[in-house]
Structure formats: C-alpha cells, structure tokens
Amino acid sequence: MNLSSRLAEVADQLPNKEAYWFEGESCTYGELDAAISKFSSGLYNMGIRQGDHIALLIGNSPYFVIGLYGALRLGATVIPINPIYTPDEISYILMNGDAKAVIALDLLVPLFIQMQGRLPLLEHVIICETPQGKEKGISLPEQMKSFTDVLRSGDVNFQGPKLADDDTAVILYTSGTTGKPKGAMLTHKNLYSNAKDIANYLKINENDRVIATLPMFHVFCLTVALNAPLMNGGTVIIVPKFSPAKIFTIAREQKATIFAGVPTMYNFLYQYEGGSADDFRTLRLCISGGSSMPVALLKNF
C-alpha cells in the first residue's frame, strides 16, 4: 500500500465525500482521484517516467495536492520546494535534485526564463495560473505548459506502474543552516506508514476536517494535515496563507475539528482580539510542532 493506491481505495469507498475545501470550492474524493489519474497520465504523455524527479514550487492549493499525488501515481520522485526561496536556492535544489520537470506558480515564470540554459537536466516547466499572475499580466512562453493543459490531456483511466515500498517517493531538502541544503529521501513506505501511524494515534477519520495552513512543502503539514486525513476519508481545509482572522473565520464556518500549527501561530491566535473560543467550538484537537510550546502559552490557549 502507498499514498496513491490508498487514496484510490478511499475514492472507491467514499466517492462523494468531500476531500478538500479551498476558497469556497469543494472537491470530492471521486473528483480528486480522477484529477490525479488524468494529471499522472498527462505527465506520462510529456515523457515523464517512473524514477524521474519532479519539483513542486507551489503554495498550499489544489495544484499541490494533484501535482504531488499525480507524480507519485506515476512513480516519479517529488521534490517540494519553498516557492519564496531565492533564485540561487531554487537553482541549487533543482540541479542537486536532478529535476527533470518542475511544477511552479505563474509568478515564477520570469525566474525560469532567466534560468534557461543553466539547468541542463530540466526538460519541462509546468505553470499553475493564479489570480495574482493574471493581475500582473504574466503570459506563458511557448516552451512552458499550463497545469490545466497537462490535466486536460490525460486519461482518467490511466494506470501507473507498480510501486515498490522502498522506491523513493519524496526528497525533502533541509533548510541548510550549516551549509548547502541536503536532500532527505523518503520512500513510499515512509510516507504511507507515517500518515497511517499519525492517523491511528490521533484517531483521524472521515468525520474530521483538518485545517492545512502550515506549508505543504514541509513534512509537518505534508504528514499531519494532508496525507493523514486523505488516507482516512477526512476533509482537508486548504488555507494558502496564515492569518488569525482567517483561521478563526474558517474554523467556525467550516466546522474544523483539527488544527496544526507552530507555537508562533498559536501565539498570534491567542493575541488576536477579533476571535473567540466559540469560533473553535468544533475543534477536538490542536497539534503543535516545529519548536517547544512555551508553558504559559500552552496553559492560556
């Protein structure tokens, strides 16, 4: 079992269950699984094969979910990268990670135009359109493809290759505080086991609605707020950017049951005067990670 096959299994069991919510739009498990198969097929049509490396330069969005699972279904190795890294940091990871393709926000189109010729292994640039990109009038060069076109070109009945437990699924790069970032390789078994164990320990099930506002390119959000709920029929509430006002509103309106954050987020929420405990009345669990929680904040929150 792996993330891709388990999601397909959940989609077969709960096709009409809400898989994610994003800025007023919902997607069912049946719809998500179909999109993943189509995107995976579209990547295959472009020449991406099992074992190839695909970088993700995307914030929290459906693009990230479909791009991640679509690549995994194909047997490609995914390299999630912080989209606000500097050009030198991005270039280094793409070269060090042997990326054959990259899926990136349209705001990064100028960056990839500048990088032409500097990344000999990079064959494909797939661009995700955003409202901000449209406002800035960013157009797509001929050599780049849109995420939407790749998705539309795919076959919903696409069957990916058989995946081995110890095949590398994801390469997560360290922050590089003491030198150049280093890639940590995680296998399909690593990702699935982590998601399964976390879900079992926290008793995550199809009734849970998990706020995903931590960055999806980081292992904390990837495991706790994305993979764990999706493996168990829960709903992921995708929040692109953290703000106390937004979290209080979304938690109340979407009846969230789980929130995961770092201590700084909890401090901002505690200090925010525009929210109330009633906004969090449906939360059954708050998870903190990244650093230790100050005792005073833990008690007061």
Image: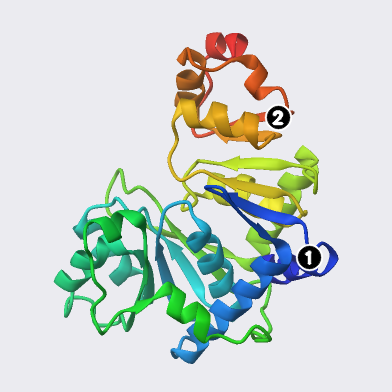
Q: Which mark is residue 153?
A: none
For numbered disc 2, what is the local secondary structure? Answer: strand
Q: Position of residue 10 (x, y in %)?
A: 79, 63
Look at the picture and state if 166 lies above or below 80: below
Give the spatial CA distance, label 2 vs label 1: 26 Å
User: How would you rate the neighbour count of disc 1 (Cα within 10 Å): few for under 14, some for 14-19, many for 20 or more?
Assistant: some
Q: Which residue is mark 2?
A: 285
Can the viewer see residue 181 in this picture? no
The quadrant holding residue 169 is bottom right
Say which amino acid is labelled 1.
Pro
Q: Position of residue 152 (x, y in %)?
A: 51, 81
Looking at the image, which is closer to me, 173 or 60? Answer: 60
Q: How is the image coloured?
A: rainbow
Q: Position of residue 198 (x, y in %)?
A: 71, 45
Q: Where, quadrant-wise, is the C terminus in this rendering?
A: top right
Q: Where, quadrant-wise, is the N terminus in this rendering?
A: bottom right
User: How would you rate the neighbour count of disc 2 (Cα within 10 Å): few for under 14, some for 14-19, many for 20 or more?
Assistant: few
Looking at the image, which is closer to me, 55 or 15? Answer: 15
Look at the picture and state if 128 lies above or below 43: above
190 left or right of 103? right
Q: Which residue is mark 1?
A: 15
